[in-house]
Image: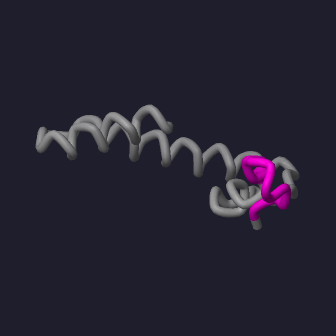
Amino acid sequence: MADAEAIVRDLVNRDLDCAASALRQLGLRRDMVRLIGEWRAAGGRDLVIHIRERVGLRPAKNDGKHAAARR
């Protein structure tokens, strides 16, 4: 899905028609929502973390000055 987003973003940045690519991206998002719904219906109970939370869990780059993880 990230590739589809990058394609749409590139087309928009170049002021080109992105309708077909955007529709494919929306289709992928619809499929993702459907799959998550099926997973939950089948008993899936784990939390699906938001991208902002996942990025916040990555360790910070260690430049020798600070070794603390981003939060």
Query: Which residue, as the protein is rendered here, is positioned at the far front?
Result: 65
- Is residue 40 among the parts visible in the rendering? no
Question: At which x and y percent is residue 39?
Answer: 76, 46
Chief SS of the magenta region? loop
Query: Left of 4 or right of it: where is 49?
Result: right
Query: Which residue extends farthest bottom?
Result: 71
Which quadrant of the rendered structure holds the C terminus? bottom right
Residue at 42%, 41% (x, y): give it.
Answer: 27
Residue 59 in magenta stretch: yes
Q: Residue at x 40, y 35 (%)?
A: 4
Q: Is residue 39 magenta?
A: no
Q: Is residue 56 left or right of residue 68?
A: left
Q: Is residue 30 left or right of residue 64?
A: left
Question: Whole-percent x and y of residue 69?
Answer: 81, 59
Q: Is residue 7 left or right of residue 17?
A: right
Camera-nearest residue between 46 and 52: 52
Residue 46 in percent (x, y) is at 86, 56
Q: Which residue corresponds to the image point at 75% horizontal and 53% vertical from the top-left?
A: 60
Residue 61: x and y, percent? 73, 48
The span picked out in magenta is 58-70
